[in-house]
Amino acid sequence: MLKYVLVAPRKALVARLSRISGVQTRFLVGRELSHGAGSQSHSSSNPDIYDVVVVGAGIVGLAAARALLLRRPGLRVLVVEKEGAIAQHQTGHNSGVIHSGIYYVPESLKARLCVQGAGLLYAYCDQRGIPYKRCGKLVVAVEQAEVPRLHALHQRGLQNKVLGLRLLSSSDIQVREPYCRGLLALECPSTGIVDYGRVAAAFAQDIREAGGALCTNFDVSRLDLAHDRPEAPIVLQSMWGAHVQARFVVTCAGLHSDRVSQLSGCNPEPAIVPFRGDYLVLRPEKTYLVQGNIYPVPNPRFPFLGVHFTPRMDGSVWVGPNAVLAFKREGYRPLDFSAHDTWDSLRNSGLARLALRHAFFGASELYRALSLTATVRQLQKLIPEITVSDVQRGPSGVRAQALDNLGNLVDDFVFDGGVGALGSRVLHVRNAPSPAATASLAISEVIADEVEKRFKL
């Protein structure tokens, strides 16, 4: 039998502590999920029947469930997660930066959600006592050709209403970051850092306190429509045989969002292509070299921001990441391999077009992934004192990049449902605008709006 976590605040049966990202979060353990729920009564009191089941306990799925519960107290909401704990993939494998919104096209939804989301996140952390550091960021031009792009970035940030932006001269850069060198820099004081695992754990606690439920080790393998159960017609089947029933389903499946969406008949596109980002870590005796986030000026021809310095809440400093094709969607080591995942990527016509368009960039990223010396040469443009002996290989993350068949990176929301009566009761969040962790609270409101509109809750 598969255990699930029932978080009903007034009916605590047994309490256990679960360590998530270094934080102990209390969950209340409920009864077991049934393997034969079809034989049970389907009254509203049946704990295996829910109004909404959210698939995926990353930060976006948790935020969406939380938003629904806060809007509609009494709604029976269950979050199911295939791993044994929450926030195990993109949420738990990122740099922890709270982005400010300077990079995005003015008046775009992406820009609005990032700026709004950062403000909401800071306020939420204050409310919940979650530590963060508003350590700021410098975007540094090290070559004359980068200066016009930096000015354009400054204007874009102003249009996006990012607060506190100012340009720093070469001498001012050294006041802010004594070991950094550059011709001109854009200072963004609203950029910060946080442990997103702790934020996700707080979202899970909010769900508990609002009467929601969380079920781990539940890998959704099928979505079926049960016509004899009008009050909860969708049956979510796990690969282990357990199942729950729901009126409606919302999926926030991250690295598997394209596959999960096909369970209700959706088109395979946009497909998810996994890109692994490998970080280096400054040796502890060298962390004094970095005070806040230090980024290069992004090259608009390439889809990623370039290697940068990021301080962490634990006092360490991460450097990177690169961006290389991952041969496993949840592969955090260079040699991790899945034949299924690799075949899905290689047969994707969009990836082939993207690779041809950015062949030089891709080759350079692969070379830097293999060579510490090549990566350090890039870093020395920002901090000349850095040497190969100052860094060591660190953790990696895998980014779920949605890609269309023309090789374009999908940056905006992609909502889908599927076909027929089943599809009319399902909302797939196939893509959420990056940076999704920063913007998670703002994104959750958009998802909740879409849920209410589609399902007329």
Image: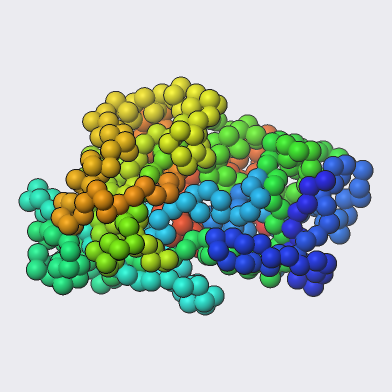
Q: Which corner quadrant of the image does residue 386 belong to?
A: bottom left
**Displayed quadrant of residue 99:** bottom left
Q: Residue at position x 91%, y 47% from top?
A: 40
| Number of numbered discs on residues | 0
Question: Does 51 sit left or right of 229 as displayed?
Answer: left
* 269, 365: nearer the viewer: 365
In the picture as drawn, the residue positioned furthest to the left comes out as: 144
Residue in the image at 73% along x and 40% along y: 238
On the image, the x and y values in percent for residue 351 come to: 39, 28
Return the x and y of residue 67 as percentages of the image width and height: 59, 63
Which percent across, then down, holds residue 244?
A: 78, 47
Residue, x 73% and y 65% (percent of image)?
Answer: 16
Question: Is residue 132 found left or right of 206 in the rendered image?
Answer: left
**Residue 239 appears in which quarter of the rendering?**
top right
In the image, residue 169 sits, relative to residue 326, either above or below, namely: below
423 lies left or right of 186 = right
Q: In which quarter of the image is the C terminus?
A: bottom right
Residue 433 in sight from this viewpoint: no
Residue 124 in sight from this viewpoint: yes
The residue shown at (74%, 49%) is 247
322 above or below 344? below
Q: Which colour scheme is used?
A: rainbow
Q: Where is residue 389 in the image (x, y as percent from the top left)?
A: 26, 51
